[in-house]
Amino acid sequence: MRALVVDDSRPIRSIITSVLRSLGFECQEATNGQEALETLAASDRPDLVTVDLHMPVLDGLELLRRLRADSRYRSCKLLVISTENDPQRVAEAGQAGADGYLAKPFTTAALSRELASLGFTAQVKTESAAATRVLVVDDSTTVRNLLSKILSEDPAIEVVAKAEDGKAGVETVRRQPPDLVVLDVEMPVMDGITALREIRRLHPRLPVIMFSSLTEKGARATLDALLAGANDYVTKPTGGPDEVAKRIRQDLADRIKALVGRTRPSAPAGSVPTKVTPLRPRPSSRVTGVVIGVSTGGPTALAEVLPLFAPHASVPILIVQHMPAFFTTQLAERLTRLVGCAVREAVDGQILAAGDLLLAPGGKHMEVVKDGAFGRIRLTEAAPENSCRPAADVLFRTAASIWGSGTLGVVLTGMGRDGLAGSRSIVEAGGSVLVQDEFTSVVWGMPGEVARAGLAENVLPLTQLGTEVGLRLRRHTSR
């Protein structure tokens, strides 16, 4: 395999070339678009060209356009590797002819996955893309060793480093970035939130999972971390050795694989996979209530999307976020400060009123039952659905049974398929469902399931989704 690396930064060219050579490529380099064209004219056609966007003489977008206009290079894979990763730039690169887009800084595993998506899977050396490289940061030697032992039993995960506090963790990330960091919250020298901010400064897209204790203090700190940019969290399991090992495998290992499998920017925001066909929009109807289901990445998503429509809503807005009880109490308090209106945990028997913004308490299903203009809240401890309690499916189907065609469902980022059956209930009742797009989701599990099932009326980036909900609510109030 042959590759041409085009970047005006010598250190970056060296890094990309080193990684590509480790994956079996023969490499040439060019410092700008014009030099790239001259190199191509004097050598055999490469299988891959990596392109930086900002370069002197001839920039990356123009180079992409010229290569795509030349019949000799139309079958060549063009991969943009750039510090810019905002949706508009990704879209521009795609329109200019890019086959893939990778944000700097990147890891070997991230580049390997991007190459695999471009069709180089069979040719890339097996060992290079084998396991997700994990850094474990925890002040407890016992916890570090236990996590290392149990996670390393999974062939898809390799614990490559351990650190005893946040400062040591940041230094490890600085020297050799892993594919993912498991980060304790409460530590000496440098706590987890401070370490997270430093990691985000060094590597904005490096996946980080907070590993925290299930206490009120731990919940507060974990939510601060999630709102500061952590991708997900796992509570430290308690119990006997077998139970602890089981929870680590089921909760932490699965999240690691889901996050690393999704964090590469694979498509422009707003784009919809080819097999996803949005449901034909239904005739506009009054919105009686909004129901939202969200999981992984939820606190940050809610903090971004709710201010776009919730402060002026004249209908109830009900939210299921997959979290334990301590966490949902703290989340309601945090969102109240960020959204600009009161966010409360729902109370059993509460009569719904216009403008209510309610969060399902952790550990309890939230249902809507008939009573008054909008209905009444019923909280239950019925069996989990989709391994979740609260479950979006429970909220969605009960709301649809009461609000009918006035039900507006919203499915945001999250692992699993919770919300799929409930979305079907909403659509069958004549209501509408909107889902977050893949690019802006931390994990496109829940919204992806709904989109692929053809139940979504639209698949939108997070901010556009919030704007769309606001428009629909304003249409309601103007009638």
Image (spheres, helix red, strand yellow):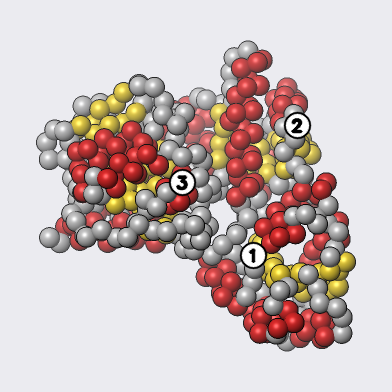
Question: Label for residue 328?
Answer: none
Q: Where is residue 272 in the image (x, y as percent from the top left)?
A: 48, 60
Instruction: Answer whether residue 473 is visible to the viewer in this image.
Output: yes
Q: Mark 2 points at which residue?
A: 152
Label 1 SS: strand
Q: In this view, does 81 lie above or below 331?
A: below
**Could you tell me how far apart the alpha carbons at marks 2 and 1 are, in whole angstroms?**
30 Å
Identify the mark nearer the N-term, 2 or 1: 1
Q: What residue type is labelled 1?
A: Tyr
Q: What residue type is labelled 3?
A: Glu
Q: Mark 1 points at which residue?
A: 101
Quarter holding the N terminus?
Answer: bottom right
Pick the front one: 393 or 253: 393
Q: Name the residue under label 3.
A: 449
> Residue 105 appears in which quarter of the rendering?
bottom right
Label 3 SS: helix
